[in-house]
Image (cartoon, helix red, strand yellow):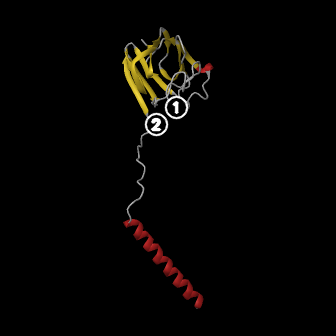
Amino acid sequence: MKSFTIFRTAAFGLTLALTGAVAHAQTMPATMPAPAKDAAKPSPAATATGKIGSADVTVNYSSPGVKGRTIFGGLEKFGKVWRAGANEATTVEFSKDVKVEGKALPAGKYGFFVIPAETGPWTVIFNKVPNQWGAFKYDEKQDALRVMVTPRKSATLTERLVYEVKSPGLVLRWENVEVPVAIK
C-alpha cells in the first residue's frame, strides 16, 4: 500500500510538472525565430528561356555571386572544365535540332560545361549526361558537341552569373566576361 501511495504521488507530481511546462512554453515568447522556408541561397536556382528560330531553349543553372573574388583564373581555373554555374551542372535544353557555332546538335537536354582560357577562345561543351553534380564526374566521352567561342570583356561587372537566350544564341555573363554562343 505504501508503494502504491508513493507511485501515485510521483505520477501526480510528474503530471503537474509537465502541464506547467507545456503551459509555460505556449505563453513564453520565442527567443529565436524559425528559419524562413525559402531562405536566400548563396547560389540560387535560375532559369533562362527563349526562342531561337523555331526551337525553344531553356537554360537551368545556379547563379553564384562574385562576392569580391577573382572568378576566371581564380575561383574557376583556366584550362579546367567548369560546370558553368554552381551546385548541379548547368543544363541546356533544345526542343528542336539546332546548329551551335555552325555544328549540328540534336534536340534534347544536355549538361553544359565551359573550359575558360587565359587568352583566346574558350571551349563550350554540350554533354549527353545532363543531371550531374558539378563537374566531378564529367566524362569527355559523353560529349555530344564541343565548340570554340570567343569571350569578350563586359562593359560592367555582372555580380551574379546570368544567362540570356535570344537570337543569335545564348550569352553567359559573369564578373567582367560575356561568353556568346551562336545558335541557329
Residue mark closest to the camera, 1 vs 2: 2
Query: Residue at the location (52% across, 31% down)?
Result: 88
The location of residue 183, given as percent across then percent down, is 43, 13
User: As rendered, which of 78 and 87 lies closer to the eye?
Assistant: 78
How much space separates mark 1 and mark 2, taking CA atoms? 14 Å
Counting the numbered discs, the total is 2
Query: Residue at the location (61% across, 28% down)?
Result: 137
> Which residue does the numbered mark 2 point to in the structure image?
42
Q: Quadrant of residue 54?
A: top left
Q: Is residue 62 above or below residue 169?
A: below
Give the residue furthest to the front: 68
The location of residue 184, given as percent across then percent down, is 42, 11
Amino acid type of disc 1?
Glu
Amino acid type of disc 2?
Pro
User: As rendered, which of 181 and 108 lies closer to the eye?
Assistant: 181
Whether residue 104 is visible, yes or no, is yes
The location of residue 39, given as percent across then percent down, is 42, 43
Label 2: element kind = loop
Label 1: element kind = loop
User: As rendered, which of 57 and 159 lies closer to the eye?
Assistant: 159
Q: Is residue 62 above or below residue 1?
A: above
Give the residue furthest to the bottom: 1
> Which residue does the numbered mark 1 point to in the structure image?
88
